[in-house]
């Protein structure tokens, strides 16, 4: 198993064993591989990430939960949730925010479940209502800096369906300038101008719905 933490377009792979993907990454000359569980090792990796030549990071330990806990301890953690919304025409709902195509999502409020947060954020950001929750797709993890702090956001992603016979309304106060339905067969187009974590969850979604 692995947990993939994105730093922009680059990723650190926390894992408890090597698979074909990890083996391939290890052959890259600018991949940093660590097989010890220590704050010193993690700090060294976090320093290397800042270099332009950095390709990927791999930290392997038999106890993945212990590794995750120690790695996440280096950041301020935030919980969020969002949705991959699909209509009866087999189209996916995308938003355009700050120059990138994205999926509707947002931070969880105190006492709120991830499912309810995802539904609330979708409605607030796009105007879509009356959604049917199908299943959870997975989580994404990404790091960003704000106000001098290092944040690690865990986003819980859910698959919803709904009718396309609704008026889309972009939440402009959240810098969303467009909301649109994209045919599933054409999602490679918005993915060309999106985030690595969004491409990753969309890949999981396609795999889950194709099977």
Image: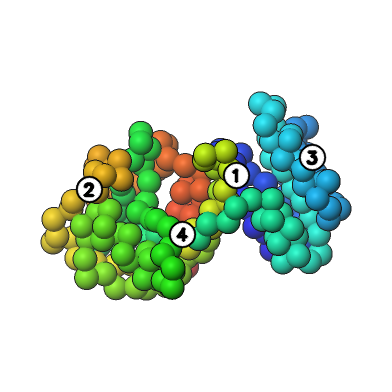
Tell whether 142 sits left or right of 116: right
Looking at this view, is 8 or 46 the one in front? 46
**Which residue: 69% across, 50% down?**
74
> What residue is shown with label 1?
150
**Which residue: 69% across, 36% down?**
49
> What residue is shown with label 3?
44
Q: Nearer the viewer, mark 1 or mark 3?
A: 1
Question: CA–CA distance between discs 1 and 3?
Answer: 16 Å
Q: Furthest-front residue in view? A: 147
Q: Which mark is residue 127?
A: none
Tally of numbered discs? 4
**Which residue: 53% across, 53% down?**
153
Q: Earlier in the sequence, mark 1 or mark 4?
A: 4
In contact (CB < 8 Å): disc 1 and disc 2: no
> What residue is shown with label 4?
80
- The answer to whether residue 149 shows anywhere in this view is yes
Determine the secondary structure under disc 4. strand
Figure quadrant of the N terminus: bottom right
Q: Earlier in the sequence, mark 3 or mark 2?
A: 3
Question: CA–CA distance between discs 4 and 2?
Answer: 19 Å
> What residue is shown with label 2?
170
């Amino acid at each position: 198993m692995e947990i993939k933490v994105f730093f922009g377009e680059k990723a650190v792979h926390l894992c408890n064993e090597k698979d074909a993907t990890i083996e391939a990454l290890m052959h890259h000359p600018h991949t940093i591989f660590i097989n010890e569980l220590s704050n010193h090792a993690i700090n060294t990796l976090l320093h290397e990430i800042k270099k332009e030549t950095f390709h990927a990071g791999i930290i392997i330990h038999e106890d993945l939960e212990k590794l995750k806990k120690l790695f996440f301890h280096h950041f301020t953690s935030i919980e969020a949730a969002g949705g991959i919304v699909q209509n009866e025409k087999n189209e996916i709902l995308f938003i355009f925010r700050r120059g990138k195509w994205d999926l509707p999502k947002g931070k969880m409020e105190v006492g709120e479940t991830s499912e309810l947060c995802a539904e609330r954020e979708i409605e607030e950001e796009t105007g879509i209502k009356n959604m049917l929750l199908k299943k959870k797709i997975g989580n994404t993890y990404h790091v960003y800096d704000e106000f001098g702090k290092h944040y690690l956001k865990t986003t819980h992603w859910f698959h919803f369906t709904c009718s396309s016979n609704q008026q889309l309304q972009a939440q402009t106060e959240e810098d969303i300038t467009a909301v649109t339905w994209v045919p599933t067969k054409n999602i490679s187009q918005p993915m060309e101008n999106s985030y690595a974590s969004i491409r990753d969850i969309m890949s999981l979604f396609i795999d889950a719905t194709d099977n």
